[in-house]
Image (cartoon, rainbow, N blue to C red):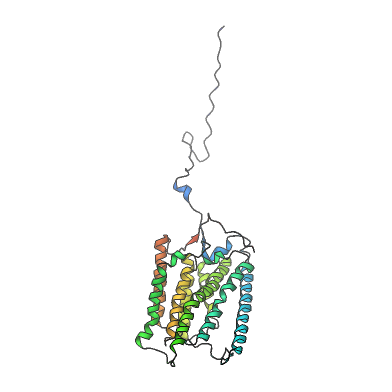
Amino acid sequence: MSERTESSPPAPDSPAPDNQAPGSSARVSPAPDTPAAHVQAPGTPYHRLATLRPEWARPWRPVLTVFVALVAYTVFASLLLVGSVTVLSLLPGTDPDLGKNLGDPTSPLDVFFQLAFAILALPAALLGVRIGGWRPTELLWSVAARFRWDLLRVRGPVTILVLAVVAAVPLLTGDLRPVADVPAGQLVAVVALILVLAPLQAVGEELAFRGLGQQAIGTWLRSPVWAILIPVPLALIGRGYSGEALLNAAVLGLCAGFLAWKTGGLELPILLHLAVEGTTSIAAAFGGPVNPEGPISLIAVLGVTVALARETEIRERVGKLRGIERPAGEGPPRAARF
């Protein structure tokens, strides 16, 4: 009896997808190394870093952040003022009334207090972000959550040299303010104070207006234009500048805000601020303008800003309408805690 082998019937053809014609080959998903698989999610620009976590981006957080910073600054300024008046009243031959003439660029005491009151914005801004914003302060520095010292290695000396020459133009042309004879030791003390304290002044003011200010506004508004524009008039309140100096200060604020967005951090805004204000303060001790003013200073600030922004675009390969961003894959840093 012969053994009969039964063969299974052939399996029916699988139905074609809805968007595929019968008989055509199936659509293949892109391989992991194809361009379609390498589309990156958009990153987070500097002014939007407070939105990395939902709890940081609640609408009331910027208000609380600014409030805590203002309270901290008021406390620090009061302590500095009361302590200084107390010390000066105990020293023989000194006048404890600081409000009579706090604006002499050749007075070490006046220069110290002008710089010191600006430096107090540094701890105030850090406390505002840590306590009011309840987020890590590292994000105030840059999208990398750190201070990027490498950005200053070449740009720092060149920028300071260019703007120092601009600040020295009135001294070279003889366009000086009338100043009384100042002892050489007093001028040395003024210059030493500026060299030591002016960098901290630049850090404090940029942390307050370009760091805390931009990120507070960026919590509500997505466009960087508002984060650049709104802090400028706030920074000019109570300055008492002339019209020409006020214009230069506004342009400096706009350029610093633009660089913060373009470069993704405060390193170059701090550098620009220091190069303008520091060199002007030193020149003022020798008879130059007390504040940056005039078309030469204005053009120099704009030119340096354009050069720094263009160099950033070339080095980082970012477009003219984009700034350096925090990559989406990095995510937010650790949550703030004491």
Q: Which one is nearer the viewer's eye here, 326 or 111?
A: 111
Whether residue 137 is visible to the viewer of this picture, yes or no, is yes
- Quadrant of the rendered structure where residue 79 is? bottom right
**Residue found 38% across the figure and 85% down from its top:** 171
**Residue found 37% across the figure and 79% down from its top:** 165
Q: Which residue of the protein is positioned furthest toward the front in this rendering?
A: 92
Residue 6 rendering spot, x and y as whole percentages = 56, 16
- Quadrant of the rendered structure where residue 55 is? bottom right
Residue 229 rendering spot, x and y as whole percentages = 51, 73
Question: Is 78 drawn above or below residue 19 in the view shown?
Answer: below
Question: Is 241 drawn above or below residue 139 in the view shown?
Answer: below
Q: Which one is nearer the viewer's eye here, 203 or 108?
A: 108
Q: Quadrant of the C terminus?
A: bottom right
Question: In screen coordinates, is 131 left or right of 45?
Answer: right
- Quadrant of the rendered structure where residue 121 is? bottom right
Question: In screen coordinates, is 246 left or right of 303?
Answer: right
Q: How many marks?
A: 0
Question: Is 17 drawn above or below residue 58 in the view shown?
Answer: above
